[in-house]
Amino acid sequence: MPYRFNSFFNIIQFVVDFILLNTVYLICCYFFNQLWYQQNGSHFLSLLFQLNLCWFLIVWYTDYYNAELYFVQISRKTLRVLVQFSLLIVLSIFLLKFHFESRLFLFSYLFILLITLLCWKYIFILLRQRTSMFNLTKRKAILIGSGGMMNDINAMFSQDYSGYDLIGTFSDEPTVNNHLGKIEDALDYIQHTEIAAVFSSIMPTQHEVVQNLSLNRDKLRLRLIFVPDYKLYFNSDVSVDIHNNLAFISFRKEPLENLLNLTKKRFFDLAFSLLIWSIFLWWLLPIIAILVKLTSKGPILFKQLRSGRSGIPFVCYKFRTMTDGCCSSSKSESSPKPHITKIGSFLRKTSLDELPQFINVLIGDMSIVGPRPHMLADTEEYRAALDAYMIRLYLKPGITGLAQVSGNRGKLSIPEMTERLNRDIYYMENWGLWLDVHIILKTILLLIKGDPKAQ
């Protein structure tokens, strides 16, 4: 890896963050008379232990220290971590029935901690960009290769924290940055110059010079690192995983193929669903069910087969919004029809007819956030028209999704469906818990304002 000092800097961040976490707590305790030897400070050590444990869990869970070295990105990630940390603290206090009297103390602590961490992160970025301040020696390196990615690699090494000092590039294309000569000149240059590493976008089988370097790298005391240009073979971004010295290259990033990420999402789905059930659904669902039953004859729930993950059909639940006999597994409820009941029209406009899908979430057929499930007939129609359509079936369908909060909902034409599909694929490739939270918040705002596309 070109970023040689990542682990070193991550340890520094981890240690300093814990020092700040505890120092800010001590300062707040002092000013709020919460120290352990005072009358109101009997729970000082217990809460301190909770804070440290929760912080450790959050930074491990969110992979906090793997962030780009830009203050805006680090600030956003720090804010997200503090929000999750705050929620976890409140939850632990509630579950453990911890005796805690001062909300002002907790709010002040979290606010001061946020400001302190942001100041520290700004200082950290300045220090990390100047590795010489840590007395960390950069190794001299050269780049061998050709193609459009040469200037991109040059730009990456121009960052001070890469750990390498890129002397220049040997390429048969003289237009690249820091051009030192042709590829055939590289071996002679290495033999007469103190070079610690060679980065090559060309594989040994592609050029004799690179093959010689590969065979004689130990004799030359040289680190040879390959940076292959995958765009020569793939026409889109790729995902590369290394296991047991084998490189597995796939056309798309799929964070939810990782078992840990999948577990995180399932835990989030269950926790959020149980929260909604405990606050709203336990009383709201019976009321809606009674209204549906009183206003028209027929079952309370409308059941329809939809395409699930991997294309496996599942029974999707909704409140019935049409007169009995007007709906079936092959007919859509999305288009306006004269058989919609009075309460059904209201349920559709407010999306309350979708609430029974929380049952689907609990039994594992659906997720809170994901591509909306289509009818089996629609799946076949779109599959025939759009080559990439079946990609959206890599994920569990969701109650809400990125496409829905972006205006792509309901029955769509093929061009409109292409736009929805692109958003579903973007969600799949860029999944994160914070993205799920963002989509849920946008969904709530749409429900409050009213979605004009809801029917």
Image (cartoon, rainbow, N blue to C red):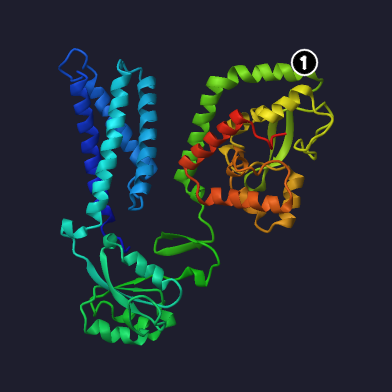
The quarter of the image holding the C terminus is: top right
Front one among 208 and 2: 2
Q: What is the x, y in percent for residue 183? A: 36, 84
Helix, strand or loop at mark 1 = helix
The answer to whether residue 69 is visible is yes
The quarter of the image holding the N terminus is: bottom left
The answer to whether residue 11 is visible is no
Name the residue rendered at 76%, 35% in the picture. 333
Quarter location, residue 291: top right
Front one among 425 and 1: 425
Q: What is the x, y in percent for residue 63? A: 37, 45
Q: Identify residue type, mark 1.
A: Leu
Q: Which residue lies furthest to the top in this view?
A: 39
Above or below, 395 relative to 191: above
Above or below, 194 relative to 239: below
Name the residue rendered at 30%, 15% in the picture. 101
Residue to which mark 1 is pinned: 294
